[in-house]
Structures are given as structure tokens and as C-alpha cells.
Image: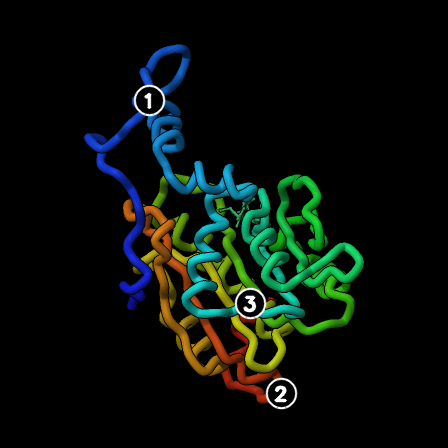
Amino acid sequence: MVDKALGTGGRKSDKDLKIRVKSGKGRTVSSTKWLQRQLNDPYVARARAEGYRSRAAFKIKEMDEKYKFFRKGMHIVDLGAAPGGWSQVAAKATGSTDAKPLVVGIDYLEMDPIPGVILLKKDFTEEDAPAMLIEAMGGHKADVVMSDMAWPTTGHRGTDHIRIIHLIEIAAAFALDVLAPNGVFIAKVFQGGTEHELLHMLKRHFKTTMHAKPPSSRSDSAEAYLIARGFKGSNDTVPGEEEYDR
Ligand SMILES: C[S@@+](CC[C@H](N)C(=O)[O-])C[C@H]1O[C@@H](n2cnc3c(N)ncnc32)[C@H](O)[C@@H]1O
């Protein structure tokens, strides 16, 4: 169930647009639409005004305002971090500094440095990525593992579905390895796309699981976030868990 209290996204219909972009000038129809949407998007303007690198920053900010995941001194892992909005929000909320970094982010894209954040340029699905993240965390367990990862879509529904589920599964397996008791796992999912098996597994390991759609997540996007809170700890062996091992 999606938490309706978080809203359903802020997409304007075409008639509400303040800035219209003319097609032509070598732009394709889709790039014209993208540009028009960016220019009319209040979250893009807010991100620029507030110094965030992406409008995505507001998604984690809005979810944190409602669910209060972050606290000062917490250790956070950001999977699929580029260009860095979520890491910026996490660094600010935890009080992370370069002298005592509490946030570790990973992305296969190059990122400019973010104060208080250790950034790894790496594909998270590579076998050595989890070990590199654990090393960057300096032996600390994570209080929050958050994933905004998504592959570029292929246009083939079935393939896209399998690819996103695979990403969420390995993110969840990583979270089970590194989370501290009571930790939180947040992952981007696509509505109607969360595998029952995965949800079932998370329900066994966390006190609560739910889906949320923050207001800044566009209403015409199937994107939502899976939030699992209250990690029960990794000491108990749960039958079936090995399915999610890498
Ligand atoms: C929606 S963006 C994240 C935006 C980010 N949360 C922010 O606030 O700026 C998704 C990111 O996931 C990354 N990504 C997708 N698959 C990945 C993978 N296998 N390993 C590392 N990063 C990945 C993409 O490169 C992309 O930068």
C-alpha cells in the first residue's frame, strides 16, 4: 500500500505550464518535453535555490520529515548516489564532516566531491562492491541503507522489471549484512513491481515495511519507495535467506 499521506506527486498538466519550449533547434520531441518539464518544475528551482544537486534530494527529505530516519551521528549508505542530492541531505542531517565522515555513497557515474561524504565510483552489482563499501564505512554498521538506483529503461517491460528487481534484491541482501539493529532500508521500487518474495523476506527481518510516494515523486511516474524499518538484527538465521545471497 502506498502511503497516501505523502501525496501523489506534483506533475502539472500542459495547460498549467508557465514556460513553453518550442520544438526545433535540433531538439527531439522527447528532449523538448523534458526541457519544458524541467523549466516548469518547482522542485528543480528549489533544488537550485537550496544548493541541492538534484530534485531527487526532496524525495528523501520529504520521507525523512515524515518518518524521521536520520539522526545526528548516524552512519548512512547511499546506493546509486549520483549526482548526490540524497547524500547531501544525509550528510546535513547526520552532521557528517570530512574529518568524521558518516555517509558513504556509490555510483558508477563520476561525482563531484560532497563535504562529509565518501564517494565510490563503482557499479554496485560488481562482486567486490559490498566489501569496498564496508571498508569505506570504517568498520561501522549502517543505521540507514538507502537506494535510489535504477537502470536506464530498455523499453521492454519484462526486462526492465527483472532488472529493477535484481537491483533491489542485491541492495536488500547488502542491507541485511551491514545494518545495525533497528536500522532502516529504503529502496526505489516501481508500483506493482515489488516481488512478493522480496517483500516477504523483508517482513521477516524488519519490524515494519511499507511503500511511500513522496510529493516530489512525479505522479506520472510508477516510482515509489519501499521503506523497511526496525531491522531485527543479523544473528537469527531465517530459512530461505540464502536465496538473496550474492
Ligand atoms: C535517480 S538517480 C539517483 C539520484 C540521487 N538519489 C540524487 O539524489 O542525486 C539513480 C542513480 O543510480 C545509479 N545506478 C544505477 N544502477 C547502478 C549500479 N548498478 N551501481 C551503481 N549505481 C547505479 C545511476 O547511475 C544513477 O546515478
Q: Position of residue 195 (x, y in %)?
A: 38, 66
Residue shown at 36% from the left, 43% from the top: 156
Amino acid of disc 1: Val
Q: Is residue 181 left or right of residue 222?
A: right
Label 3 Cα crowd, 10 Å radius (few <14 / some 14-19 / many 20+):
many
Location of mark 2 (residue):
235
Direction right: furthest residue = 99
Height in image: 45 above or below 149? above
Direction front: furthest residue = 49
Residue shown at 44% from the left, 69% from the top: 67
Look at the numbered discs 2 and 1 and tell me whether their residues touch, using CB distance below 8 Å: no
Amino acid of disc 3: Phe
Mark 2 residue element = loop
Screen quadrant of the N terminus: bottom left
Screen quadrant of the C terminus: bottom right
Direction top: furthest residue = 25
Height in image: 160 above or below 66? above
Residue shown at 53% from the left, 58% from the top: 147
User: Picture quarter containing residue 220?
Assistant: top left
Location of mark 1 (residue):
29
Q: Is mark 3 within 8 Å of ligand 1?
A: no
Could you say which is closer to the camera, residue 108 or residue 116?
116
N-terminal label among 2 and 1:
1
Residue shown at 42% from the left, 79% from the top: 208
Q: Position of residue 66 (x, y in %)?
A: 41, 66
Which mark identifies residue 70?
3
**Measured Cα–Cα span from mark 2 to mark 1:** 54 Å
**Measured Cα–Cα span from mark 3 to mark 2:** 24 Å
